[in-house]
Image (cartoon, rainbow, N blue to C red):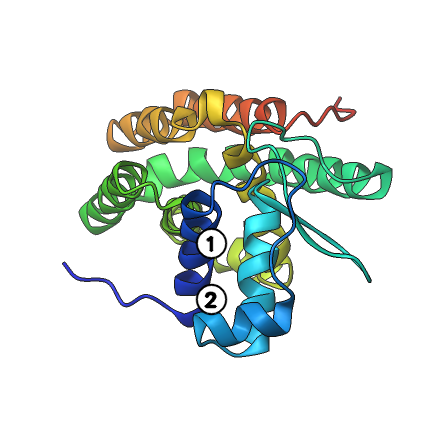
Amino acid sequence: MTQTISAPERAARDIRNLIKTKALQTGDSLPSQRALAEELNVSRASLREALATLEALGLVRTLAGKGVFVTDPQDGTPRDAQSTRHAAQVYQFRLAIEPYVAGLAAQARTSTHISSLQNSIEEMRQAFLDDNLFQAAKADTEFHNILLHAADNPLFAKAMHPTAQIIHENQMLPFANAAAIQAPLQEHEQVLRFVRERNPSRARDAMHFHVLSAATRAHIAFLRP
């Protein structure tokens, strides 16, 4: 199935290609945002969204008044103490909710949910083959959203809706760890296995492991009971 590529996604893809074709190294600067927007034929708003995504993926860093710089894709460490604390809080929030949601989904899911979860896994797998981290991150987020609906309790989706963008950015952090780039795919497969088998305790444990492992890959340590 052919997927529609949004302007920010296209810009993110083109910036990654620009980094590769020009063989830019860690610390090298990209053209100014105005020049980038003109070169890529996108709006400044779409370019900012693309850069924000690439920054969450650990591929670039934007420094106010200085420009955009290439970063080490294997360095998943957040930019500063404030962003570290924020990421830790998001992981705490996810750990409190998502394993419980996975357990409920294992009991309430339908065959349609199973198909949708499988499709999101295949989309992530194809995205990795295409070296499209933007699409892989979208598929990652979609997997978790499907579980929210499969839990058959709209209050969970409503509670998490205001933080949807923050959680999406949080889910992108581990993708900066190139050494374990496909680990989320394997962990999603484990969650799906137990949801399919209607095994709530194992589904809950698999999601608990997934969230903690994601935090580890992003180099985030956080207090938990």
Along the viewing direction, whichever of 13 and 171 lies nearer the viewer: 13
Three-letter amino acid code at the position of disc 2: Pro
Q: Position of residue 172 (x, y in %)?
A: 53, 43
Q: Which residue is mark 2?
A: 8
Tell me the quadrant of the picture where the C terminus can be found: top right
Given this view, does label 1 or label 2 mark the residue nearer the observer? 2
Dot 1 alpha-carbon crowd within 10 angstroms: few under 14, some 14 to 19, many 20 or more:
some
> Circle 2 — which element?
helix
The numbered disc on residue 153 is 1
Viewer can see residue 6: yes
Tell me the quadrant of the picture where the N terminus can be found: bottom left
User: As displayed, is residue 171 above or below residue 189?
Assistant: below
Q: Position of residue 202 (x, y in %)?
A: 40, 20
The numbered disc on residue 37 is none
Disc 1 from disc 2: Cα separation: 32 Å
Viewer can see residue 160: no
Q: Going 52% across and 57% down the picture, which residue do you hit?
A: 157
Along the viewing direction, whichever of 111 and 70 lies nearer the viewer: 70
Horizontal side of 196 relative to 1 (left or right) equals right
Q: Position of residue 143 (x, y in %)?
A: 38, 45
Q: Name the quadrant containing residue 216.
A: top right
